[in-house]
C-alpha cells in the first residue's frame, strides 16, 4: 500500500491533525461491531475540512537516498531514542564506557595505555627529566576541570587558569623549577571541590596515594572519567523536566524529519494498521441496502491495533517503526504478562485437579504462586525448554502439595494423581490448550476494555473472573502498558490518522457533505507504579 510519503504537513498543527486518534474513544468503540451511523460518523471525522486541511498526505516520486541522507536519518533516530529514554526512564543514567574483559578492543586499549604511561614514566626519569607529555596531560586536565564549572564560577575558573597556566609551567620547565607533584596535589584539591559526594572516597584515596607520579596521574584520569559521567547525569536530571514538557512535539518533529529523509520509514507501521483494519472488516455487519460491510471506526481500528502490539511476535513480523523507541519496555511487559499468564494457568489446573482439600488455604496458594513464578521466570526465553521448565514446576508443586496435605491431616497425592497433574501442567505449553486459551482470551478482553476506556484508572482493579490469583501483577502490567500506549498515541497520532484515513477511503468513497467531527473526552493518563 503506497503510504510511504503520507505525513502531517507540519508539527505545529500536530494536535489538530491527530485529535481524532490521540483522544480515546468511548467504551462503545470496544465492541467488535459498530452501527452504520457510528461508522459513517467516524469516517466523516477523518474527511472534515479541519482534518484534511492539515493532514492530507503529500505525494512525491520515489528517490534514491544519498549516504548523507541515510546517515542523517540514523543520527535523528539515535537522538530520538536517547531523548525518549531520558524522558520516560527516570532511572536513566550514563556510566563510563567499559569493554568486556576478554575482548580484543580491551586488549588493544590496555596495551596502548600501558605504552603511553610507560613512555611518560621513562621521560620523567630521564636526567634531566622531559616534561612535554606531562604538560599535555596537565593541559587536558585543566580543560576537563573547566568543563565542570558553572557559568558563574568565575573565581574558581580564574584560580584554575592561574595555577595551571601552561606558559608559566613551560617557563618553569626551562628553568628546572617545575613542581609536578605540587601541581598534581592542586588538581586533586580542585577535583575534591567539584566532584559529587559519591566520589569523596575516590578523592581521599588520591590524596593518600603513595605511588609514583605516573601512577597518580593515571588514577586522576580514572576518577575524572567518573566525574564526567556524574556531570552528564546531573545535567540530564536538571534538563529532564524541560524535556518532558517538549517531548511530544520534539519526538513527533524528529520522526517527521526521519520520514522526510526516508520515505519508507512508516512501512511496518502501515502494514500493522492495515492488518488490524482488514481483520476488523471480516467481523463487521453488512450495510443495509448497499450489500457491503460497514467500515470500522478509526478509534476501533487504533484500539485493536494497540492490543495487537501487546501480543506482538517480533519473530514473525517486524515491530512497527513508531514503537522502536519503546521496544525494550514493550518486550518487558510482554515477557512478564506471558509469565504471569502461565502462573495463573498452573494455579487453575492445581485447584481444579486437587479439589476441596486445598480450597481456602490462602497461605498455600500464595506459596504455590510465588514458587511457580520463580521457576517460570525465563520460561519464554528461546534458550529455555518450556517443557522442562513445566516439568520442574510440576515436581515442586506435587512436593509442596503433599507436604501441605499431610500437615493438615489429608492423604498425600497418589502416583496416578501426580501423573495427571503433571500432564495437565505440561500441556499448557501447547497453544491449543483450553485453559491457556481461556486465560489468554480473558487477559486480552481485560486489556482491550482498558485501552478503549476514557478513564481506565477506575477499571484497573476490575480483573475478569479466573484471573484473581494474579490481580496485583496484572494491574501493574496494565498500568505500564497503558502508559506506553498513551504516550505513543500522543506522539504518533497524526501519522496513524493519515494511515487509517487512507485505508477508509480505499474501501469506500468519502461522504459528500461531512458534518463537523465528533468530539471525544480526553483519556486519563495512567502512570506505572
Image (cartoon, helix red, strand yellow):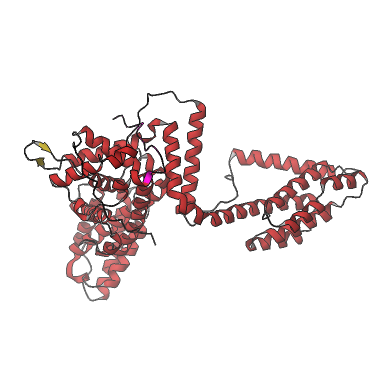
Q: Quadrant of residue 59?
A: top left
- Residue at image point 28% right, 46% down: 20
Residue 36 vertical placement versus 452 (above, below): above
Q: Viewer-proximal residue, 440 or 190? A: 190
Q: Does 129 lie within the magenta span?
A: no
Q: Position of residue 523 (x, y in %)?
A: 31, 56
Residue 407 vertical placement versus 394 (above, below): below
Q: Position of residue 34 (x, y in %)?
A: 15, 47
* Quarter of the image with the C terminus in it: bottom left
Q: Does 7 lie within the magenta span?
A: yes
Q: Viewer-proximal residue, 360 or 130? A: 130
* Quarter of the image with the N terminus in it: top left
- Residue at image point 36% right, 49% down: 490
Q: Viewer-proximal residue, 205 or 147? A: 147
Q: Main secondary structure of the magenta part?
A: loop
* Outermost right residue: 175
Q: Position of residue 32 (x, y in %)?
A: 17, 48
Q: Position of residue 384 (x, y in %)?
A: 36, 48
Q: Is residue 437 left or right of residue 331?
A: left
Residue 332 vertical placement versus 109 (above, below): below
Q: Is residue 134 left or right of residue 431?
A: right
Residue 432 visible in rendering: yes
Q: Viewer-proximal residue, 289 or 452? A: 289
Q: Which residues are magenta?
A: 1-14
Q: Quadrant of residue 187?
A: bottom right
Amino acid at each position: 500500500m503506497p503510504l510511504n510519503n503520507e505525513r502531517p504537513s507540519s508539527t505545529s498543527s500536530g494536535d489538530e491533525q491527530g485529535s481524532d486518534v490521540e483522544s480515546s474513544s468511548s467504551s462503545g468503540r470496544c465492541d467488535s461491531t459498530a452501527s452504520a451511523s457510528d461508522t459513517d460518523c467516524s469516517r466523516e471525522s477523518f474527511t472534515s475540512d479541519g482534518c484534511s486541511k492539515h493532514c492530507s498526505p503529500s505525494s512525491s516520486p520515489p528517490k534514491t537516498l544519498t549516504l548523507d541522507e541515510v546517515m542523517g536519518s540514523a543520527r535523528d533516530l539515535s537522538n530520538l531514542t536517547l531523548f525518549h529514554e531520558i524522558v520516560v526512564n527516570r532511572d536513566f543514567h550514563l556510566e563510563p564506557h567499559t569493554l568486556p574483559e576478554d575482548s580484543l578492543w580491551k586488549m588493544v586499549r590496555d596495551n596502548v595505555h600501558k605504552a603511553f604511561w610507560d613512555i611518560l614514566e621513562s621521560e620523567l626519569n630521564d636526567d634531566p627529566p622531559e616534561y612535554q607529555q606531562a604538560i599535555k596531560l596537565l593541559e587536558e586536565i585543566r580543560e576537563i576541570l573547566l568543563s565542570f564549572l558553572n557559568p558563574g564560577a568565575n573565581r574558581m575558573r580564574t584560580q584554575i587558569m592561574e595555577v595551571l597556566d601552561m606558559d608559566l609551567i613551560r617557563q618553569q620547565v626551562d628553568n628546572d623549577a617545575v613542581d609536578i607533584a605540587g601541581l598534581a596535589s592542586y588538581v586533586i584539591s580542585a577535583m575534591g571541590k567539584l566532584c559529587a559526594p559519591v566520589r569523596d572516597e575516590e578523592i581521599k584515596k588520591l590524596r593518600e596515594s603513595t605511588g609514583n607520579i605516573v601512577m597518580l596521574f593515571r588514577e586522576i584520569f580514572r576518577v575524572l572519567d567518573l566525574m564526567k559521567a556524574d556531570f552528564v547525569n546531573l545535567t540530564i536530571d536538571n534538563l529532564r523536566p524541560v524535556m518532558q514538557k517538549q517531548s511530544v512535539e520534539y519526538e513527533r518533529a524528529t520522526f517527521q524529519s526521519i520520514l522526510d529523509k526516508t520515505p519508507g520509514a512508516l512501512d511496518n507501521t502501515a502494514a500493522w494498521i492495515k492488518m488490524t483494519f482488514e481483520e476488523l472488516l471480516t467481523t463487521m455487519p453488512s450495510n443495509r441496502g448497499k450489500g457491503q460491510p460497514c467500515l470500522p471506526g478509526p478509534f476501533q481500528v487504533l484500539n485493536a491495533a494497540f492490543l495487537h502490539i501487546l501480543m506482538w511476535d517480533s519473530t514473525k513480523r517486524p515491530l512497527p517503526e513508531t514503537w522502536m523507541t519503546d521496544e525494550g519496555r514493550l518486550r518487558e511487559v510482554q515477557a512478564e504478562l506471558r509469565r504471569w499468564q502461565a502462573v495463573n494457568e498452573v494455579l487453575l489446573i492445581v485447584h481444579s485437579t486437587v479439589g476441596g482439600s486445598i480450597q481456602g488455604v490462602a497461605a498455600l496458594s500464595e506459596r504455590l504462586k510465588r514458587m511457580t513464578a520463580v521457576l517460570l521466570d525465563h520460561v519464554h526465553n528461546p534458550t529455555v525448554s518450556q517443557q522442562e521448565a513445566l516439568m520442574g514446576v510440576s515436581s515442586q508443586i506435587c512436593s509442596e502439595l503433599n507436604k501441605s496435605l499431610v500437615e493438615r491431616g489429608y492423604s498425600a497425592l497418589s502416583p496416578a494423581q501426580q501423573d495427571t497433574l503433571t500432564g495437565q501442567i505440561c500441556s499448557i505449553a501447547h497453544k491449543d490448550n483450553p485453559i491457556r486459551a481461556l486465560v489468554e482470551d480473558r487477559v486480552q478482553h481485560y486489556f482491550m476494555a482498558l485501552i478503549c476506556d476514557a478513564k481506565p484508572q477506575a477499571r484497573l482493579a476490575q480483573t475478569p473472573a479466573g484471573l484473581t490469583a494474579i490481580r496485583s501483577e496484572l494491574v501493574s502490567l496494565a498500568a505500564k502498558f497503558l502508559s506506553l500506549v498513551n504516550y505513543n498515541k500522543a506522539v504518533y497520532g497524526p501519522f496513524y490518522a493519515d494511515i487509517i484515513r487512507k485505508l477508509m477511503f480505499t474501501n469506500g468513497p468519502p461522504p459528500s457533505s461531512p458534518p463537523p467531527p465528533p468530539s471525544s473526552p480526553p483519556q486519563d493518563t495512567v502512570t506505572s507504579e
